[in-house]
Amino acid sequence: MAKHIDFLKKPLTEIYGENCFSDAVMKERLPADAYAELKLVQAGKTNLTKEIAEIVANSMKDWAIDKGATHYTHWFQPLTGLTAEKHDSFISPNADGTVLLEFSGKELIQGEPDASSFPNGGLRATFEARGYTAWDTTSPAFIKDQGGVKTLTIPTAFISYTGEALDKKVPLLRSMEAVNKSSVRLLRALGNTTTTRVTSTVGPEQEYFLVDEALFQKRPDLLLTGRTVFGTMSAKGQELDDHYFGAIKERVGIFMQELNYELWRLGISAKTQHNEVAPNQFELASIFSTSNLSTDSNQLVMETLKAVAKRHGMVALLHEKPFAGVNGSGKHNNWSISTDDGQNLLQPGDSPEDNAQFLLFLTAVVTAVDRFSPYLRLSAANSGNDHRLGANEAPPAIISIFLGDQLSEILDALADGTIYKKRDGQVLEVGVTTLPTFPRDMTDRNRTSPFAFTGNKFEFRMVGSSQSLAGPNVMINTTIAEILDEFAERLEKVEDKLAEIKLIVKEYYSRHRRVVFNGNGYSEEWVEEAARRGLPNLTSTVEALQEMVSDTCVNLFEKQKVFTRAELESRLEIYLETYSKQINIEAGVMVEMAKRLIAPAATRYLQEVLNSISSQKELGFKTPGQEKLAKELSLHINKLFKKSDILEEEIVKALGLEHDVIAQATAYRNKVVPAMAKLRIEGDSLEKITDKGCWPYPSYEDMLFRL
Ligand code: ADP
Ligand code: MG
C-alpha cells in the first residue's frame, strides 16, 4: 500500500532539504565564528580543530533530536558498492537512572565500525588490523527516515589506521584534489591570479526498472541476483518505442512523486524524470554538484528508489541487465570542472583568451581519454555491465570521444594548419583565439558515444546503473589532472602563452585525435574502424580490471597521489572476487531453477501430454501435434539436465581456483558464463512450449508490461 504523504500540505520550499544539515542550517545554528571556520575547513584551507568538532557535533545532535532522531550513524561506502552504517544512540546513562543525550566531537569525527567483514583485499592484513571512519566535512549530514525511524547519518571516509583507502570516497576526494591542483597550476601558468580552487562537477542520470513486487518474489533469480537468468522475450518488446514516448502510468507517477518528495527532503535535487526505452524502464536526473556530493546523493537516490518502490508494492531493479533482449540500465555521468570564481572550464568563451583556454582544456580531455582509455573503461566494469558494453546494445566497450563535427573540424584545422570552412560556406581563419559561436544543441545529436561533449561538459555514458559514481570520477579526474600538469609544465616555461597553446593543441590533438569519433558507436563498422585505429576494445570485466595494476596505471595514480600500488592491487583483488562471487551466485541460481522449477514443471506437463495422447489413441484419434510436442519436451528436459550438470562441473572447477583470483575470475568468465548461456537456451525453449498455467515463475510479459 502506498504510504500517504502530505505532499501538498507544506510548500515545496519548506520541504526541500528539511532532513539535511545543510549549509543554511549550519549558518543558522552554529555560532558565527564556528561557522566561518568550518567553511575554511570545507574549502581545505585549514584543519578541523577539536573545539570546532565539538561545537558542530552538539549542534548536529540538537538538530537531529528536534527532528526525532535517537541514533546516529557513520555512513560509508565500502568496496562492495553498497553503503554501510552502524547505529549508536545518543544516550549516556547517569548513575541515578536518568539519561543524557550526548554526541561528542570525537564521535562526529571518528568511528570504528566492526570492519572485519568488509573486503579490503589484504590491505588491513598487510598494514593494520582495523579501519576507522572519518567525517567528510564537505558532504552534509542528513536524517534518514525509514518508516518514521529517524537516524542522523554522517557521511564518512573509511580508512585503515595507516591511511590506506578502504572505500570509494577517499580516492574520489584525492582525485578531486589532484584535478584542483593541476587546474589551478595551469590557470596560473596562463596568468590567472584570481581562481583559488577548481572543482570537478557531476550531474548523474540514473536508469532503473520497476517490477511488481508480487511477481518479483516469485523469481528466485531476481531475488538473489537482481537479474533474470532465464526468461523468453514476450511477443512485444521495445520495438515500437511506445513506452519511451508514452505518458507515465498513474501508479508510476504516484511512486515518482513520493520518490521526489523523499529526495527533496534530503536536499537532493531530483529534477527530471521520464520513461526510458525499455518497457517499465525509467530515468531520474539530478542537478549537478561537486563530484563528491553527487556521488553521495546518487547512493541515496539508489537507496531511496528501492525503499519507495517497496512502499508502492514494486521493486526497483538497479541491475545493468535485468532482462535479456531489452535495453539494460546505465548511469550517465555528466562531468565538468569549474573554478571558485564561476568559470566552467569546458565552456567555450566570449573572449580570445577564454577560447584559447577552452581549447586547451578540451585538448587535455581528448588526450587523457585516448592515453588512459583502459582506466575509464575499467571504471565501468562489473558483471552486470558486461551484458551491455560490447554486447548487442551500446555504448561499446571501446572508449571514444564525441566532439561534434564543428568542433572536430576546428581542431583538425588547427592540427593540420589548414583553413576551416564554416557550415554556411564562409571561410574562417581559425586560431586558438577565434572560435565561431557554437549553438548549444550542436552536440546532443549523438547518443551512441561513450564520452560525448555536450556543449559545456562531457557525458560519460558507460557507467552501469548499479555502480557508485566514485570509481568513474576517480578515473576521469586523475587522468585529466595528469595531462593538465603536462600542459602547465610547458606553459610555465614560456612568455608567449598563446603561441605555446597553439603548439600544444596542434601537437596533442594530432597525436590523440584517433579517439575522436562522431559516427554511430553502436555499429559493427565502428568496431572494425576502432581496431584499425588501434583503440583498445576490452570487452569483459575480467580483462578490463587487470589494467588497474599495469605499470602505467600505477605510475599515474602514485604520481597524482590518488592510489598507491598496494591500494590498486587490493582493489583489483576485491573487484575480481566480487565478479567471481556474482557469477557463482547467478550460476547456482540457474542450476537450482533448472532442476527444481523448470524440470519438474516441464516433466509434469510432458506427463499430461502423454496421458492425453494415450487416452486419445484409445479412442482412435490421431495426435501428431502432441506427439511432436512430447518429443520436444522430452528432448529439452534431457538437455536441460545435461547442461545443468556441465554448468555444475564448471562451477566446481572455478571454485577450486580460489587461491588465484585472476585465474578464478577468468574461469568464471570463460567457462561458467558460456555454460550458463547454453543452459539458458534449454530453459527458455521449455518455457516457450510448456503450459503457461503451470510455469513456475512469472514471464517477461508479466513483468515488463504489467504495472
Ligand atoms: P543537456 O541539455 O546537454 O541534456 P542538461 O542541462 O539537461 O544538459 O543536463 C544534463 C545533466 O548534466 C544534468 O544532470 C545537469 O545537472 C548536468 N550538468 C549540467 N551542467 C553541468 C556541469 N557543468 N557539470 C556537470 N554536470 C552538469
Ligand atoms: Mg544522458
Image: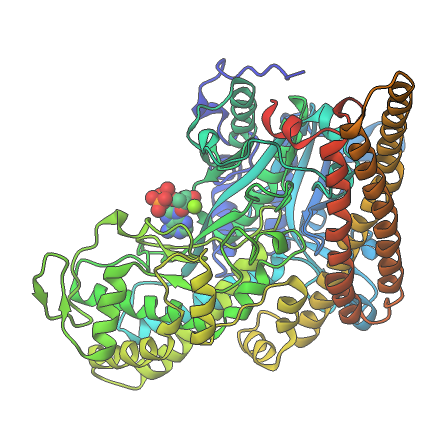
State the colouring used for the structure image. Answer: rainbow
Location of residue 227 with respect to 649 vertically, above or below: above
* Frontmost residue, 414 versus 20: 414
The quadrant of the rendering that contains the C terminus is top right
| Residue 3 against residue 241 in the figure, above or below | above
Q: How many marks?
A: 0
The answer to whether 323 is drawn above or below residue 451 in the figure is: above
Residue 104's x, y, as percent?
71, 44
Determine if residue 601 is in view.
Answer: yes
| Residue 95 relative to residue 214: left or right | right
Question: 507 or 656: nearer the eye?
Answer: 656
Residue at horizontal 67 percent and vertical 15 percent from the top: 1
Image quarter for residue 132? bottom right
Image location (x, y in percent) of residue 92: 81, 36
**Residue that appears at 58% across and 67% down:** 538
Q: Residue placed at 14% from the left, 73% from the top?
A: 419
Q: Quadrant of residue 592?
A: top right
Q: Is residue 47 visible?
A: no
Direction from residue 329 to residue 339 in the image, left or right? left
Q: Position of residue 606 (x, y in %)?
A: 86, 30
- Please, is residue 549 above or below residue 293 in the view? below
Residue located farthest toward the bottom when viewing the structure as drawn: 493
Q: Nearer the viewer, residue 302 or 429?
A: 429
Q: Residue furthest front?
A: 620
Q: Quadrant of residue 693?
A: top right
Residue 345 at x, y = what percent?
A: 32, 60
